[in-house]
Amino acid sequence: MDKEQNALYEITADQVTIEVTDQKTGQTVSRTLPIAYRENAHFLRLSGEDMAGKRSEIVFISKSGLDKLIDMTGGGTDIDTCENHVN
């Protein structure tokens, strides 16, 4: 299998394990939580339920993801990225 076939373009999971070290005691603890995880080159999304059972999400957008979002909503520069490709 070549590198292209092994390339990882997206990571998804139904739960995450968080490991933290307490600043005062130095004790490290880890917890596995029912949080959906989705990551690609443009964003990282964590989703789950709040205390009322309603869906809640946090999204972290990369610079490239923000640039694509701005471009898709008409706020980008008027540059032909398809090299005059016509549908």
Image (tube, grey):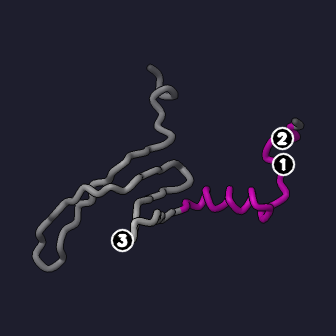
Residue 35 placement (x, y as % from top left): 36, 56
Q: Residue at x 71, y 62 (%)?
A: 70
Report the side of 77 relative to 66 (left or right).
right
Question: Of helix, strand and loop, which one carries label 2?
Answer: loop
Report the side of 52 relative to 22 (left or right).
right
- Amino acid type, residue under disc 3 in the picture: Met
Q: Which residue is mark 2?
A: 83
Magenta highlight range: 61-85
Residue 25 placement (x, y as % from top left): 10, 76
C-alpha span from label 1 to label 2 = 6 Å
Proximity of marks 1 and 2: CB atoms separated by less than 8 Å = yes
| Front-most of residues 33 and 18 | 33
Task: Give the answer, above or below, for where 80 lies relative to 28.
Answer: above
Q: Quick one: quadrant of the N terminus? A: top left
Sequence-wise first label, 1 or 3 = 3
10 Å neighbourhood of mark 1: few (<14), some, or many (≥20)? few
Q: Residue at x 45, y 29 (%)?
A: 6
- Amino acid type, residue under disc 1 in the picture: Asp
Residue 27 placement (x, y as % from top left): 11, 69
- Amino acid type, residue under disc 2 in the picture: Glu
